[in-house]
Structure formats: structure tokens, C-alpha cells
Image (spheres, grey):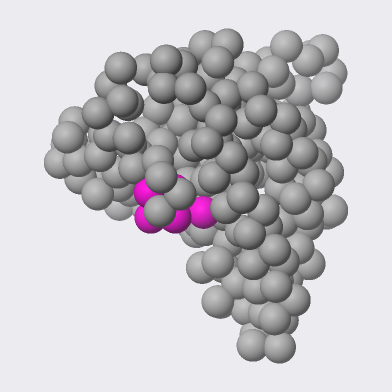
Amino acid sequence: MERCPTPLPTPVLDAKQLARLLSVIEEEVLPKTAQGVKEGNKVFGAAVLRDVEGYPTVIAETNHEMLCPLYHGEVYTIKQLSELPADQRPNPEECLFLSTHEPCCMCVSAIVWAGYKKIVYLFPYESTRDQGIPHDLQIMHELWAVERYQVRNKFCSSAGIPELIQHLPEDHRPALTQQVSRITSKYGELSQKYHQVTPLRKCPAWQLENL
């Protein structure tokens, strides 16, 4: 199949916009994730924001795989948004999809099928692996022999917040870097709790051999 000659542009955000996205993760997604971890769910969450000034939140959610193995943070967010009244559901093309972790192959496909074009995440696959959950990289390698999806294509374009911070003027970076560090520490603590409190009997069989 011929590669798309005109992929969508990489998301570009200024310091104020990135601070807003980080605040959504820290103040809206993370508290739900903390509760979810207590129930045996993983540390992944997501939010949909209107792509306008201030990036107002449409919905913020977290992983609910104890309800259904398909309810990763992104998929559950899309599901919950779809159940809102029609007048509260914005056009996906006019939104930014925010994910705490780089979406797995299932989730990035769900995001595309739902119509979202712009994806921004905090933690790349490598960070997810280092938090003790290597399945994103393993599945892509085993199923398609690739390291990751094309981050720029005709359906969507994605970027990591740390990468976007590095493209800002140097004097805009310290506050954001500090915010990222604080959030990273909180997710590290949650990841440890997840691995400590989640009984092996709750894990799908295909995960057990990798624990």
C-alpha cells in the first residue's frame, strides 16, 4: 500500500497549553486512576479536550479493565463520552485526545475509528515498559514486526509532551519539566501499588508469563 504523501502535521502547543494538559492529567485523570488501581486496574487514563483556547475538558477517565479487558483508559473514555447527551459531544475533529501513556495498538486504532485527529500523551512506550507493563511494544513487534505505529499519518498525528517541551524556548521549560517530574513520581508510586495489590488471578493468562 502506498504511503500517504501528506500526513497530518505534528501537534504544536505552547507552554501555557502544555501546562493545561499536564494539569488535566494531574488534577482530573490521576485521582480517578488512583481509585482504579485500588480496584485492580492499570495506571492508564485519558481525556478529551475541546481544541479551543483554554482546552476545556469534555471528559476525563481511567482504565477499567476489571469491568472488561477492552476498557483501556482511552477506550473507556471514548465509551463514556459516547453515552453523553448529543449536545455535549463535540466533533472529534475539533478535539484533542490526551492520553497519560502513548496509546497501545488497540487504543490508537479506537481513537482513529472514533474520529480524533490530534493525540498528545505524557509517557512514551519505553516509560510504560519501565513501569512494568511491556505489552505495548511486545504486541506491535509480535503481530506486525514494527516498533510502533506511524506517529504522523493521514488519520491522526501524535506527539509526546516531553518532546513538545523540548521544542519550546529554553526559559519556558523549567516549570513544565518540574510539573512532569511531579506527575511522573505520582505515577511511579501508583505503578508500584498496582503491582503490589493486583492478585495474579486477576491478570489475563497472556500477561502472566511476562510478570
The image shows residue 160 at horizontal and vertical percentages of 52, 58
Toward the viewer: 64 or 188? 188
Magenta-span inclusion, residue 57: no
Residue occupying image coordinates x 64% and y 88% = 170
* Residue 78 visible, this angle: no
Magenta-span inclusion, residue 126: yes
The image shows residue 13 at horizontal and vertical percentages of 66, 64
149 relative position to 15: left or right = left
Residue occupying image coordinates x 63% and y 59% = 185
Q: What secondary structure prevails in the magenta region? A: helix
Residue occupying image coordinates x 68% and y 35% = 33
The image shows residue 4 at horizontal and vertical percentages of 30, 46
Toward the viewer: 43 or 156? 43
75 relative position to 150: left or right = right
Q: Magenta stretch?
A: 123-129
Instruction: Say above or below: 51 vs 126.
Output: above
Quarter of the image where the C terminus is located: top left
The image shows residue 206 at horizontal and vertical percentages of 28, 21
Residue occupying image coordinates x 64% and y 22% = 39
Instruction: Say above or below: 210 vs 76.
Output: below
Quarter of the image where the N terminus is located: top left
Toward the viewer: 76 or 192? 192
* Residue 175 visible, this angle: yes
